[in-house]
Amino acid sequence: MPGTPSPAAADPAAAQPPERPPTGLARLVLRAAGPARRRPRTTIALWLLFVVLCTLAGGLTGTRGLTDAEQGIGESGRADARLDAAGLRAPASEVVLVRSATAAATARTADRLVARLRRVPQVAAVQGPRGPQGAQLRRDGGRTALVRLTLRGDPDDAGDHVGPVLDAVAAVGKAAPGVRLDQVGDGSMSRATDDIVAEDLRRAELLSLPVTLLVLVIAFGALVAASVPLLLGITAVAAAMGALGVVSQLVPNGDSTGSLVVLIGLAVGVDYSLFYVRREREERRRGHGPDAALRAASASVGRAILVSGLTVVVALAGLLLTGIPDFTSMAAGTIVVVLIALLGSLTVLPAVLVLLGDRVDRGRLPRVLRPRRRAGAGGLWGGLAAGVTRRPAAALLIVGALLVALAVPALGMRTGDAGVDSLPPDTPLRRSVAAVEAAFPGAPDSVSVVVHGRGLDGHRAGLRALGARARAVTGGRGAIDVAVARDGRTALVAVPRPQTDEEGTRRTIEALRGDVAPAAGRLVPGAHAEVTGGGAYGVDFADALGAKLPLVVGFVLGLAFVLLFAAFRSVRLAATVIALNLLSVGASYGVLVLVFQHTWAEGLLGFTSSGAIVAWMPLLAFVILFGLSMDYSVLVLERIREARLRGLAPREAAADGVRATAGTVTSAAVVMVAVFAIFALLRLVEMKQLGVGLAAAVLLDATLVRGVALPAAVTLLGERAFGLPRRRGSAATATRRRARAGAAD
């Protein structure tokens, strides 16, 4: 009858096809959440018990760290292992530069320092500017002198042993007005770095938790709902840090692993639970009961969380293929924390929501502070998505051009070891290193030529000749140290090496390996030589990364493609999402280059540019960014897929998916960017680079990719975007097709 609304028009729900029973991954997630919904108190108690047991296990086993010998790679790694087996591993060393206006004052202070250091139990040996080789430790007519010392104990623990030495040097300097003392070395560098890292991490924790809670409170409009994601993230990180001690017994812990576990664990833990809680509350607002709302959230967002979490794990597992011990440690630690966060999101989180019920909305903000929820348009992102899906080709072209333009600077990326440049510019140690290097080039660092053969103890003259040849290549000034193992099969020749840039270091190491090492057989009959030391390790590390990078990238892209295809049953969609994520990663690389290879941001972020990106940053950033960037893409695609299953056309479904997830993705992105930006404000350059790179990638992914490129690409793919089951008798779909056909006529 004309003018009479149809039942479908009167009731929008009637226009939707009947709900299909969950299949595949959705069924798996529902089964995992089932016991949690039925026995919430037991589930929560088991989770807390799990966290406590992980913490206790980590405390009982302790954390086994990587030793210098275990970090070896390539030729330098083989040489370090040979030294370790021969008992010739170089002890931790320190040098103290003594300067004054007169030679007498310098000599007097140096003598006092030598006498004071000899009484320090942690000092094994001291060499001052007097004695047979004293001339090599004096400059400027005696006004500048160098005191060298070695420490007792394990070189890996030099930072723990150097405290009394620092106190002794400070006491002598205080008693000698007008004389400047600058100390540098293995222990003092380790001590300064550890102090900065510990202080910065405390600061990051103190800032990140309240910032995260503030963003969540604003996003949810209620204190209790906001606390749930944060508590899950904290408990997941606590369990992972405990489990890390157990894991380290098999995979020794690297210096940066703990920081990375906290960073990634908090990010994914908060993200996953934020997605889940928002969807559950959305279903409750639609009038669903508690159990129905949880089932809907589990079958949809739970499925997206599982796919994105597994993608993050796959990406991080790529680090295992490098064979580099530091990366292996990072991979093991971060995979553990992601799996724990995933387990908590799919089990204990539904239990918490069941137990809270309507109380999840307690602690509501005043109405004026709560986020406004508009039906239909979806606010800014909903309107933008509607415009994008009307002109998808133009939108995709514009965003693609912007991302490519940002990625272009990455073609000029230079990598290198930050070394002392990693420390803040105002650190006393940096000034001391510069002073020692200027007066005695090579004194703060050295290169080691490891000789192996037979009867080396009888060829000390040849070993010293080999050292002199090596010193001519390095250009260092100072003594050559020769040590021979008891069995006479291994010898260590330590040669001073001035600090240079990355290219200069590579030229020096290549010259030593190409010209000096082969000469060992002529100077010491039957001997062979290998080159190690800080510079050699950096060269070998860069070469190993270059060789393994294609394998890691191929592994990550291949498995990510398989996961996306398994989730959405579309080859074209999986390839498109991976291409967009690669563009996002490339753009973040470009931002890193623009910020850290130039000087314009030095004052803004408080660092001194070395003209290079830390060597391990590109690969680590790739696996982290590729994994994390999947979070938003998978969440949006899941909602688009739901809309298609309800019968919406591809263009309408793409806009609906962006609109439905706008608040969730924006809130999650703000949390991540805020936390990563805090790391950009820390004092170590590598932490700044990691923070800037991650924050830039998340920001680009949550705006340009999620809001524009992804819905445009899905619209262009059309019916081929998802491998959806065929529907029969869908009145709504048939009506839309007839309407489009009529419009075309």
Image: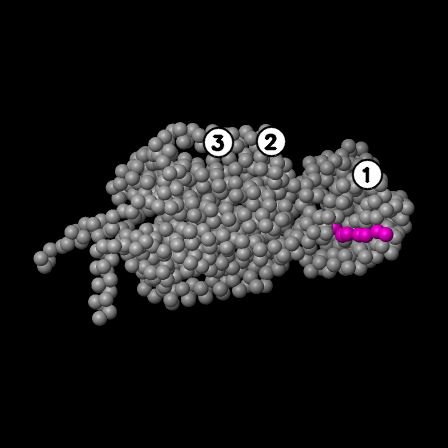
At horizontal 73% and vertical 37% (from top left) the residue drawn is: 154
Name which residue lies at 47% across and 49% down: 311
Secondary structure mostly taken by the magenta-highlighted segment of the chain: strand
Q: On the picture, is 128 further left or further right than 404?
A: right
Residue found at x 38% / y 34%: 36
As drawn, the label of residue 446 is none
- As shown in the figure, which amino acid type bears the numbered disc 2? Thr
Q: Where is residue 418 in the image (x, y as percent from the top left)?
A: 64, 52
Quadrant assignment, res 602: bottom right
Q: What residue type is labelled 3?
A: Phe
Above or below, 406 relative to 479: below
Q: Nearer the viewer, mark 1 or mark 3?
A: 3
Q: Which of marks 1 and 3 is nearer the N terminus?
A: 3
Residue ID for mark 3: 50
Q: How far apart are marks 1 and 3 (CA)?
A: 50 Å
Q: Report the magenta residues as a range.
A: 526-534
Q: Name the residue located 39 percent from the left edge and 54 percent from the top edge.
A: 569
Which kind of residue does numbered mark 1 sit on?
Answer: Ala
Residue named by callout 1: 125
Disc 2: which residue = 61
Kindly report which numbered mark, 2 or 1, lies closer to the viewer in this rendering.
2
Specify which label sits upstream in the sequence, 3 or 2.
Answer: 3
